[in-house]
Image (cartoon, grey):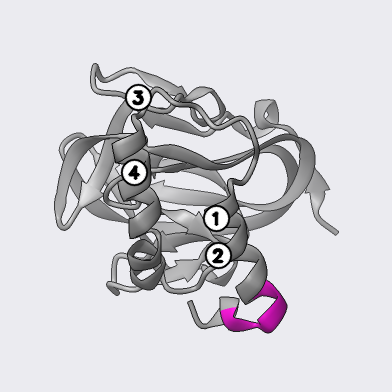
Amino acid sequence: MAKRATNSDYGQSTVQTRNGKNISLSNVQIGEEILVQEGNKLIIEPIYDIIHSEKSKFYRFIHLTVFKHHQNSTYSIGISLKYLIFKYEISTSVFASEIQLGDHLQLVNQDEIIPEKIIQIDEIISQDFSAPLTPSSTNIVNNLVSSNYAEARNHHLAHLVMQPHRLWRFILGLKQIIQTDFDWYISILYYFPHKTRLLHIL
C-alpha cells in the first residue's frame, strides 16, 4: 500500500527562475521564466499556461532516491506516476511509473545535464499537482529534466498536438490567466483520447 504523504514530508517540487531562485511549482505564474531543456541545451523560457493545477486532491506519486555520484550523496524526487520523464540512456520519454532501479535519469548539475542512478523507489499518496506549459514542452523540476505532460505516452507527439494551444497563448498574451483547471482545448485533447483509448498512442 502506498504511504500517504504531503509535500512537507519529501520537500516541495521546485523550478528555477531566470534569477536562479528556486520557487515552488505550485506557485509559478503564467509569464514567469524558468529553466528548461531545449535540445541538449539548458535555456530560460516563459510559462505559457498552467495546463493542470490541483492542490486539494490526492494523487499517486513515486518517491525516487537518486545517488549523486559526483557528490557521493543521495537526492530525493517526488513525481506523479503518469508524468513523463526522460532516461539518460534513451531519447524517448517514459512514464515515471515505468522507472526501475538502476535506471539513470537526466539531472541538472550546475550548467550541464548528467546521468544519475536510481537506487530506491517508493510509492506515496500526495497532494498538489501542477503542470506548466513552456515553448519547449519541458521543465526542470527538482533538477530533473521532465516533460510538461502526463497521461500521454509520446512526449514529441504531445508537443506537436499542443502547438496550436501554445500559439494561442502567445497571441493572447501571457498575462491572461486561465482560472479553470482545464481549458476547452486541453479538455478535448485529454477526454476524447482517454475515452477512446487513443491516449495510450499519443
When asked about the image quadrant of residue 70, the answer is top left
Helix, strand or loop at mark 3: loop
Q: Describe residue 105's horizontal placement relative to residue 132 as left or right.
A: left
Q: Residues within 10 Å of mark 2 (few under 14, many from 20)?
A: some
Percent x, y for residue 110?
A: 20, 34
Q: Contact (CB < 8 A) between labels 2 and 1?
A: yes
Residue 149 is covered by the magenta coloring: no
Q: Is residue 100 visible?
A: no
- CA gap between label 3 and label 2 equals 25 Å
Mark 3 vs 2, N-terminal side:
3
Q: Residues within 10 Å of mark 1 (few under 14, many from 20)?
A: some
Mark number for residue 186? 1
- CA gap between label 3 and label 4 equals 10 Å
Mark number for residue 189? 2
The residue to which callout 4 is attached is 134
Q: Describe residue 71's horizontal placement relative to residue 44 as left or right.
A: right
The residue to which callout 3 is attached is 32
Q: Residue at x 69, y 30 (%)?
A: 9
Q: Which residues are magenta?
A: 194-198
Q: Nearer the viewer, residue 108 or 152?
A: 152
- Residue type at the position of mark 1: Ile
Residue 195 is covered by the magenta coloring: yes
Q: Residue at x 26, y 20 (%)?
A: 20
Q: Does the magenta stretch mainly form a helix, a strand or a loop? A: helix
- Residue type at the position of mark 3: Glu
Mark 3 vs 4, N-terminal side:
3
